[in-house]
Structures are given as C-alpha cells and as structure tokens.
Image: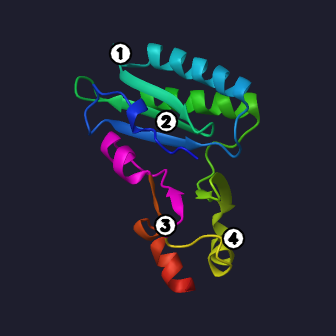
C-alpha cells in the first residue's frame, strides 16, 4: 500500500495551519469518493470566517480520511466557520451512511491494508500479534500541517498507544 501523501498537501500553507482529520467507518467506493471530493472542494471554495474567505484545503486520503486544513496566517477560523466544517462532515455521514466521529475506532496498516479496530479490542489485538510496536497507526489527533506531515501515520510505539503495548506485553 502506497502511504505517500505529503506531496498532495498544499505548499503555500504555513506549518502551523490548523488540521482536522475525520476517519470514516468504512472505505468509500470510487463513485462516493469522487462525489465527496466535489463536496469538499465546494465547501472549501465557500469557507468563510466573519465574511472573510478562509485559506482552506480539503481532500480525501486513502478513500477513508477526510482532511480539512485552514491557514490562519491572514484570518483565524472562528467558531462559526468551524461549525460549518462540522456540518459538511455530518452531511457526508448522512449521505453515505458512515460514522465520521467515532474516536474509539482506531485505524492501522496491517498486511498492506487499512484495518479498523475498536479501542476496546486493542489489548486482544496486541496479545495476539495483530498489532505490534511497529504497526503503523493513523494518529487522527494531529492539529497542524506540520503534525500531519510528521505525526499522522506513525508506528504504534511512537503514539499514545505505546503505553497500552507496554502494559499488555
């Protein structure tokens, strides 16, 4: 599985640009992905904060992760503009019958595929070797462009899950 994505991020955005990652509960079909990309592009082109356009970016990575980015160097993102981004994600949820807000569902790269695992099953997965310290984990809690580039897809041992591995092993 090709996990290269950094070249697809916009170059003209500050490293401190705010990032939101939303993970879908399933892989989108090609047709759905194309529709979602169009919806995201439409949203970003009309994204405003108190009447000022937001310098925004959005995309769907790996057919399952919606990434929104706002460069706040010229105009900060207000509560209302953040709410509007949440509305578009909720629209995706309803239209495509997926969950985009389940923070208890973890995503890993196992056998060259993205595999979803409920947090409640993590200890069992570790005990049975499904998840190891070197398994790649999608750390969707990244907050900036810089973190998206350096801390999004990382080995479990470099994530907050490392302490879970230490307790189980």
Q: Residues within 10 Å of mark 1 (few under 14, many from 20)?
A: some
Which numbered disc, 4 or 2, marks the residue that appears first in the sequence?
2
**In magenta stretch: residue 146:** yes
Expressed as whole percent of the image width and height from the top left, the position of residue 87 reads: 58, 29
Residue wearing tag 2:
67
Q: Kindly identify which residue carries mark 3.
A: 156
Give the spatial CA distance, label 3 vs label 2: 21 Å
Question: Sequence-wise, which precedes: disc 3 or disc 1?
Answer: 1
Question: Dot 2 surroundings within 10 Å: few (below 14), some, or many (20 or more)?
Answer: some
- Which of labels 4 and 1 is toward the front? 4
Of circles 2 and 1, the one toward us is 2
Q: CA distance from mark 4 to mark 1?
A: 43 Å
- The Cα–Cα distance between marks 2 and 1, rounded to whole angstroms, is 18 Å
At 65% from the left and 22% from the top, the residue drawn is 34
Label 1, on which residue? 53
Of the image marks 3 and 4, the number of the one nearer the N terminus: 4
On the image, the x and y values in percent for residue 133 come to 50, 72
Which residue occupies 34% across, 43% down?
A: 144
Mark 4: secondary structure: helix
How does the figure colour the protein chain or chains? rainbow
Q: Is residue 78 visible?
A: no
Task: Tell me the residue that label 4 is attached to.
Answer: 121
Q: Report x, y in % for residue 135.
A: 54, 65
Q: Would you place residue 88 above or below residue 43 in this image?
A: below
- Which stretch did the figure color magenta? 134-152
| Residue 77 in the image: above or below residue 110 | above
Q: Is residue 30 magenta?
A: no
Q: What whole-number distance in Å separates the C-alpha atoms at marks 4 and 2? A: 26 Å
């Amino acid at each position: 599985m090709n996990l290269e994505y950094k070249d697809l991020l916009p170059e003209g955005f500050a490293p401190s640009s705010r990032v939101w990652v939303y993970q879908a509960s399933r892989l989108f079909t090609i047709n759905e992905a194309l529709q979602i990309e169009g919806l995201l592009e439409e949203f970003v082109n009309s994204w405003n904060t108190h009447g000022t356009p937001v310098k925004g970016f959005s995309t769907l990575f790996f057919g399952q992760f919606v990434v929104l980015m706002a460069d706040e160097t010229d105009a900060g993102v207000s509560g209302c503009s953040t709410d509007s981004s949440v509305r578009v994600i909720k629209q995706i949820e309803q239209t495509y019958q997926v969950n985009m807000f389940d923070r208890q569902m973890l995503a890993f790269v196992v056998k060259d595929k993205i595999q979803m695992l409920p947090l409640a099953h993590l200890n069992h997965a570790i005990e049975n070797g499904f998840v190891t310290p070197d398994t790649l984990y999608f750390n969707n809690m990244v907050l900036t462009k810089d973190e998206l580039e350096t801390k999004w897809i990382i080995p479990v041992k470099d994530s907050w899950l490392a302490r879970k591995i230490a307790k189980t092993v």
